[in-house]
Amino acid sequence: ALEEKLLAEPRNNETQHAMAATRSECFRDSSINDENDQQMKRRHLLVFPSECNFGGDRPDAKSIIAVAQECGWYTMLDIAKAASTGPVNLRELNPDFAALSFYKLFGDPTGIGALLVKRSSISVLFENDERRIPQYQGGGSVSIMVPNQDYTVPKGDSPAGQLESLTSGSIHFRGICNLSRGFDTLERLGGMFKIHKHTICLAWELTSRLRQLRHGNGKAAVQIYGAWGKSTCMTDNNGPTVAFNVIRNDGSVVGYNEVSKLASLHRPPIQFRTGCFCNPGACQGALGLTDQQVIENFEKNGHVCGDHIDVVNGLPTGAVRVSFGKDSIWEDLDAVVTFVERTFVNHHNETCSESDFTCENPTKVPRSPSTTQVHISEVYLFPIKSCAAQRPRKWLLELPSGKLKYDREFALVDTSGTALRLQTCPKLGLISPVVDPESQKMTVSAPGCKDLVVNLSESLYHGGDNVVQVCGNKCGGRLWGDAEVSEWFSSFLGIQCWLARYSSSTTEIYSPCNSKGVLRSGFSNEQPILLVSENAVAALNNVLVDQLQRPVDSKRFRPNLVVKAVGDENDSQHHQYRHIEDDWKTLSLANKDLSFKVEGGCPRCTMVDYDPATGQKGKTLRALAKYRR
């Protein structure tokens, strides 16, 4: 009960009632004798931040500290965030300890902070307690040490001197010498009061303008979290940090990863902090996720802190954050608002997908007929994920998944068990695997290397079951081949790696489904089979040429099937048939009792920027963002 009341933020006239109730909880149990009571008081420490780094919320720290100390608790206030953009009066707040980051104050030097200790609380750091971590006995922390006996005298007899004994090794003295210049800079800017006023004004202006962003159907384009999402005026309860998510006109959430990627393509680039910002509690509370949902996001979808899984079952897993500091200017917030409006706000008064419109010329693309006849022009197989494609004349399908046999069945993994990807290792595109299903062998070639032959027989695999990370998702895998196989790939790529083969038995334990709930059948990110139309690629190339970029071919999108509309004989009909696949619900093979269910569009990342034949990076994703999301 005490923890719940201390962590709750008192509100106006409810403050005194909450404090009174807390005091009664502290001393309700009269059976505790004075000695045990004193021991409990000595060993309890309440630590909390004076400003939340997720959304800028500022609790009533003074009241919380007063109640905690009256109950016999020591208090430690984390002022690293609040002190970087405003004054903090420790005499008024009266905590026993306070943690401060000079890096957050000045931006440089890194790795320097301070633990501020109230003089009357110094002694508690040196009370005898068998649970304490043994004292550091290196240089700078002892007055004398006898190596042949267990005889050590910590440095300093006075309270201030005792603190020196807590130093573990040499301090960062060069960085400390630079701090004076940082304080001089703050003074030249007018001090922390002016910095606080400046940053709060910027945050208020940003939230005010974000609230005004609405789609043509009247729905809000942005959802703001925390104190800024509840108040429309500047108060002391808000810090200059704003967390939000972008909302489409149909009410669905734009993942923070998509926002971040498109922002990086902006000119000049905008760099957002995204995710949960190392604050999972505040993140979960703001997003309204239950404990079970958070656990399932990890166990079923493989979502972990820092990955790119931004939406699961239609719900966001994190947010986008904008923080203002002493160096922020009005143009910064204006760039953010302009980017969000131009990229995500649909001004048309109807609910439809963003792919129906272009950003530069918002006219609706003519819809394709209910049934479209197409023919398959190209078939591609990718035996090893992110490596070159094999183009067969015909190939076997695995049912019921519809996956091409051996497609993305192998991956190259590094020492951490993460699958190598083309955008981080461009030389992968130069590795060409060719599978011969009759001989059950895969021949792998690369420039300047002798061909490697890998046996595909299940009875010859080496190693046990392992977990392979593919774009943050957990997949089952088994190390395949001997040391010669690993040496071949490692030597060519210049990275220690191993060949892994997809294992359905391992996946059943870790993550049997992808982010859309589809049963996995290989190391594919989304669906077991990917399709693109020649018409869509032609439309993209028109944009690339206008931007003075080189055109691309269909292999840039690593599809399994490439189709072309029947009757599309010249470029003049590309506009009618471009992105015809957007409306498809099913795809049936002529004269075959076989149909594919179309699950939807496949989000693309920066991998489409890389030419799979050369590894050179282009600007394909930026061109796509101009007219299609």
Image: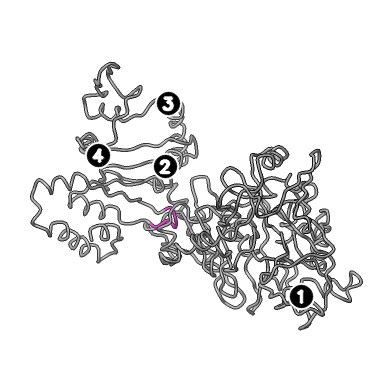
For badge 1, the amino acid type reads Val
User: Whole-Å distance between the Cαs marked 1 and 4?
Assistant: 70 Å
Q: Looking at the image, is mark 3 or mark 4 nearer the viewer?
A: 4
Q: Secondary structure at mark 3?
A: helix
| Residue marked by disc 4 | 131
For badge 3, the amino acid type reads Phe
User: Whole-Å distance between the Cαs marked 2 and 4?
Assistant: 43 Å
* The quarter of the displayed image where residue 80 is located: top left
| Residue marked by disc 3 | 173
User: Whole-Å distance between the Cαs marked 3 and 1?
Assistant: 64 Å
User: Whole-Å distance between the Cαs marked 2 and 1?
Assistant: 55 Å
Q: Quadrant of the N terminus?
A: bottom left
In magenta, the rendered stretch is: 53-57
Outermost residue on the right side: it is: 569
Up-down: is 28 above or below 49? below
Q: Nearer the viewer, residue 375 or 48?
A: 375
Outermost residue on the front side: it is: 459
Q: Secondary structure at mark 1?
A: loop
| Contact between labelled residues 1 and 3, with CB atoms less than 8 Å apart | no
Q: Which mark is residue 365?
A: 1
Q: Nearer the viewer, residue 252 or 57?
A: 252
User: Whole-Å distance between the Cαs marked 3 and 4?
Assistant: 31 Å
Whether 316 is among the magenta residues is no
| Contact between labelled residues 4 and 3, with CB atoms less than 8 Å apart | no
- Mark yes or no: residue 1 visible: yes
For badge 2, the amino acid type reads Gly
Query: Which residue is at a point 76% across and 83% down the rendered structure image?
Result: 370
What is the crowding at mark 1: few (fewer than 14 residues within 10 Å), some, or many (at least 20)?
some
| Residue marked by disc 2 | 191
Mark 4 or mark 1, which is nearer the start of the sequence? 4
Q: How many marks?
A: 4
